[in-house]
Amino acid sequence: AMLVDHPLSNERISLAESRIRQFKSKRPSRNASFDLCKARIDVRYMRFDLKSFKQNLLQASASKANSTYRNYALALIAYEEKNYNEAAGYLASLAKLSRNIFVLDLKTDVDLKLGRGAQSSATLASLYQKRPLDEAVALNYANAQLELGNSRNAIKILEKFTRKKPQNLTAWDLLAEAYQKAGNRCSLLQAQGEAATLKAQYNVAIGKLNEGLNTCHDSYTREILKAKITKVNELRNFDEGINQSMR
């Protein structure tokens, strides 16, 4: 065991269990964001049978979950089932948490489905003035603007965001959609190239950027595209070298 890079599995388990026993038991957090986050994970990522999960949540007397967790989970399930009015009803029970980012994120999606995007957009606009680089605020606001047909405003929001946070894939995907709706093919290809690079789809990225060279006529933009193609080639070669060394 002393000659291997990592302890053996049974040793790791024993060590973890002994450390756990050293800690006193702790009551679950009663922070609202904790409950909302847990509900979101349970509904969207734990692969529960949503029908059974919903029935358990509706049996309030049998459920150990508090009202914040229960109403948000039920709203998420209703949204997944495309019952948007039902989702809005559960969210109404969380009115005191209307500015919480978890609630606001889902409420924006629900409002857009119910044709009430302008209402959510106004709330997000107010938050955006204070928190322009908050991912949930900026991307939800941009998405609301896109759904309302305001692609120029969405582009403005997303360009500012991606300048500060260029590694955010969702932002690039939204920006590509905004450019497409605005009819800006040159910028669309650049955004698609950035998104493909973040996904490590290097051949796709190079294809998009090369297409950009044939589409964009501004000399400055073309130089940027050439530099990006060089960078993506370097990333591709590096990854291929890593893969070969591991075989």
Image (spheres, rainbow, N blue to C red):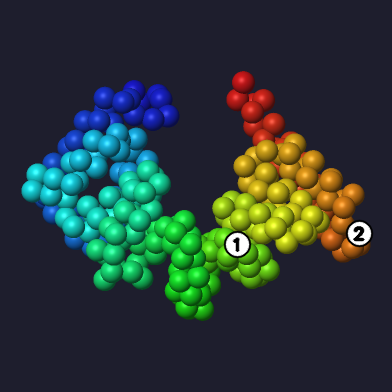
Residue in the picture at 77% in, 59% down: 183
Looking at this view, is 84 or 182 the one in front?
84
Residue in the picture at 64% in, 28% down: 243
**What is the total number of numbered labels drawn onto the structure image?**
2
Q: Which mark is residue 19?
A: none
Disc with the residue nearer the chain's start (1 vs 2): 1
Q: Is residue 124 left or right of residue 69?
A: right
Most distant residue in the left direction: 61
Residue type at tag 2: His
Task: Tell me if residue 17 comes above or below residue 1 in the rendering.
Answer: below
Q: Are marks 1 and 2 in contact (CB under 8 Å)?
A: no
Residue type at tag 1: Leu
Q: Position of residue 218 (x, y in %)?
A: 89, 63
In which image quadrant can residue 174 be found? bottom right
Residue in the picture at 13% in, 41% down: 21
Q: Residues under labels 1 and 2: Cα distance?
A: 27 Å
Residue in the picture at 18% in, 41% down: 56
Name the residue tied to disc 2: 217
Q: Is residue 150 left or right of residue 129?
A: right
Q: Which mark is residue 146?
A: 1
Select label 1 or label 2 by which is in front.
1
